[in-house]
Image (tube, helix red, strand yellow):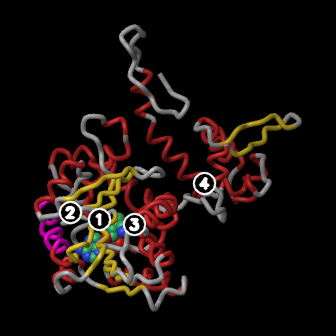
């Protein structure tokens, strides 16, 4: 059975059992390929600009008319465009979500997700069976010096994470004490902590990431007029944090970071985090957290566990694991909140009541 979102649900006992659901799952690769090709070619942007027929879009994109017609049929099958009869010719209108999120230049644009697929997913997913056999990735994109991957990908993370940033930053900022110090480990281009700095002009932010990535972090902070308030430190964050004094930060942010490391590395890092936090300070872990007893409640989180197996020594750890990690370093006061606009969960923990 297929739901209106395109997701498939298992047949109940009363329904005839057919292979339809399995066939639908097996075509998932075609869904991804179609979406990414349409983004690569700027199809949604063309339609938004008023080029609504296959031949117009073909001319505009420099593609064959036959190819564009077939791609539009497939994009229509995904429900992202709606074909209409236009005086005997087919023209295409954007579905509301495609209009909001897939048109370049619009505020909500998330089409940069295509870079994640080109740089990573199209390479690693075909290796899944081999990785499962071996139990570890052929390439550790995360823990080793995976900087080339991250320089390709981090420029796009801000745009993809815009909705989550709009939720996370105020949630954390409103609980900061006056004149606080924020340490953003594995900051990437810094969308989360930059928003905190913008809303809390009394706070100072230190972002830490590899040298190739920290340049983008510092540039974006400067563009936002935050150079005096936000500082980028280049290096391996595991070494940088060891050099930080005890009791020096009100908030340590680990956004989309711990999933890249095995539990021994996570534990070592969390020990340092607990050491550098002020007695009233907090750690904020923002992660894709699956529910092992309800894998379909957050499928992205469940697939993310495999993604991590193929790319790192880490995992999409569940909430019990994060809680145990926090408690093992004395951060006993623990809270969780699911982000309303993304697959992540915010976990905050402290040594004293939050
Ligand atoms: C998935 S990205 C998350 C970026 C950002 N925190 C966000 O949520 O958008 C992980 C980041 O951690 C950085 N990183 C991972 N391990 C690191 C290490 N050992 N030292 C410095 N940076 C590291 C990567 O370079 C990358 O920018």
Q: Are marks 2 and 1 in contact (CB under 8 Å)?
A: yes
State how many labels appear.
Answer: 4
Left or right: 35 as drawn, with respect to 107: left
Image mark for residue 101: 4
Circle 1 SS class: loop
Q: Which residue is mark 2?
A: 261
Image mark for residue 226: none
Q: Are marks 1 and 4 in contact (CB under 8 Å)?
A: no
110 or 292: nearer the eye? 292
Disc 2 to disc 1, C-alpha distance: 8 Å
226 or 161: nearer the eye? 226
Is ligand 1 within 8 Å of the beta carbon of the residue shown at mark 1? yes
Q: Residue at x 27, y 79 (%)?
A: 249
Binning the other alpha carbons within 10 Å of mark 2 as few (below 14), some (14 to 19) or many (20 upward) gives many
For marks 1 and 3, the one nearer the N-term is 3
Q: Position of residue 257 (x, y in %)?
A: 29, 65
189 or 321: nearer the eye? 321
Q: Residue at x 69, y 59 (%)?
A: 61
Q: Are marks 3 and 4 in contact (CB under 8 Å)?
A: no
**As displayed, is residue 71 above or below residue 323?**
above
Q: Residue at x 36, y 56 (%)?
A: 123
Q: Which residue is mark 3?
A: 172
Quadrant for residue 192, please give it: bottom left
For marks 2 and 4, the one nearer the N-term is 4
Binning the other alpha carbons within 10 Å of mark 1 as few (below 14), some (14 to 19) or many (20 upward) gives some
Is ligand 1 within 8 Å of the beta carbon of the residue shown at mark 2? yes
For marks 1 and 4, the one nearer the N-term is 4
Q: Residue furthest bottom?
A: 228
């Amino acid at each position: 059975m297929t739901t209106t979102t395109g997701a498939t649900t298992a047949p109940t006992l009363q329904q005839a059992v057919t292979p339809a659901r399995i066939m639908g799952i097996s075509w998932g690769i075609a869904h991804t390929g179609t979406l990414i090709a349409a983004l690569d070619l700027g199809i949604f942007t063309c339609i938004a600009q008023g080029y609504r027929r296959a031949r117009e879009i073909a001319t505009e994109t420099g593609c064959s008319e036959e190819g564009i017609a077939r791609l539009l049929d497939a994009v229509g099958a995904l429900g992202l465009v709606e074909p209409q009869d236009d005086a005997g010719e087919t023209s295409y209108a954007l579905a509301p979500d495609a209009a909001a999120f897939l048109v370049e230049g619009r505020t909500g644009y998330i089409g940069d997700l295509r870079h994640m697929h080109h740089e990573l997913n199209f390479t690693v997913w075909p290796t899944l069976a081999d990785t499962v056999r071996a139990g570890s990735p052929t390439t550790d994109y995360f823990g080793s010096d995976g900087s080339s991957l991250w320089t390709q990908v981090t420029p796009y993370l801000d745009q993809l994470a815009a909705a989550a940033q709009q939720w996370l930053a105020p949630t954390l900022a409103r609980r900061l004490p006056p004149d606080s110090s924020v340490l953003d480990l594995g900051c990437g281009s810094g969308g989360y902590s930059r928003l905190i700095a913008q809303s809390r002009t009394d706070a100072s932010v230190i972002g830490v990431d590899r040298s190739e990535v920290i340049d983008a972090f510092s540039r974006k902070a400067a563009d936002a007029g935050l150079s005096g308030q936000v500082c980028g430190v280049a290096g391996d964050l595991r070494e940088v944090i060891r050099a930080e004094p005890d009791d020096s930060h009100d908030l340590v942010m680990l956004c989309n970071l711990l999933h890249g490391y095995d539990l021994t590395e996570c534990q070592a890092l969390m020990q340092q985090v607990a050491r550098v936090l002020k007695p009233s300070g907090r750690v904020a872990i923002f992660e894709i957290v699956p529910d092992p007893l309800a894998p379909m409640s957050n499928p992205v989180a469940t697939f993310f566990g495999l993604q991590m197996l193929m790319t790192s020594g880490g995992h999409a750890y569940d909430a019990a694991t994060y809680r145990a990690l926090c408690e093992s370093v004395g951060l006993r006061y623990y809270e969780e909140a699911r982000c309303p606009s993304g697959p992540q969960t915010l976990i905050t923990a402290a040594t004293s009541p939050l």
